[in-house]
Image (tube, rainbow, N blue to C red):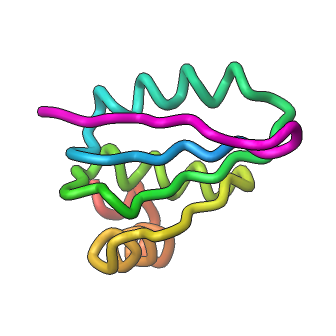
Amino acid sequence: MTYRIHRSGTPDTVVFILSGEMDIELVTTLQEFIAKEAPHLITLDLKDVTIADRKAVRFLVGAEATGIRIINCPEYVRNWIAAEKKFGVEALS
């Protein structure tokens, strides 16, 4: 699978622009990048994400719960996030 992470930002905010396939490999790398950015506000821009798997969606649910902002999210991913929140991650296992 292929993906790309581009970082941009200001002194207080960091934006990670994601493109390609969002899978566990991207999530693992992204988590490492996010950990290095504390205490900045984090935004994930998903405009160029072509596909996301279940682990990626679960990551996004958790990310939003911790205050990470998600923008330009594909509609199918946003609907999936909503379903995970509504029914709970455990219930869908």
How far across and down, in percent of the image, does residue 66 sit?
71, 50
- Specify whether 89 is left or right of 1: right
How many marks the image carries: the answer is 0
**Which residue shows up at 48% across the image and 78% down it?**
86
**Which residue shows up at 30% across the image and 62% down it?**
92
**Which residue shows up at 67% across the image and 53% down it?**
68
* Location of residue 35 by image quarter: top right
- In depth, the one of 89 and 59 nearer the eye is 59
Q: Quadrant of the N terminus?
A: top left
- Specify whether 9 is left or right of 80: right
Q: Identify whether 10 is placed above or below 1.
A: below
- In depth, the one of 51 and 17 nearer the eye is 17
Examine the structure image and report whether residue 5 is included in the region drawn in magenta: yes
* Location of residue 50 by image quarter: bottom left
Q: Identify whether 31 is placed above or below 70.
A: above
How far across and down, in percent of the image, does residue 18 sit?
40, 46
- Specify whether 3 is left or right of 40: left
How far across and down, in percent of the image, does residue 85 sit?
50, 70
Q: Identify whether 77 is placed above or below 48.
A: below
Examine the structure image and report whether residue 59 is included in the region drawn in magenta: no
How far across and down, in percent of the image, does residue 60 sit?
48, 53
- Specify whether 71 is left or right of 20: right
**Extent of the magenta region:** 1-13
In the picture as drawn, the residue positioned furthest to the left comes out as 1
Q: Main secondary structure of the magenta part?
A: strand
Q: Identify whether 83 is placed above or below 38.
A: below
* Location of residue 32 by image quarter: top right
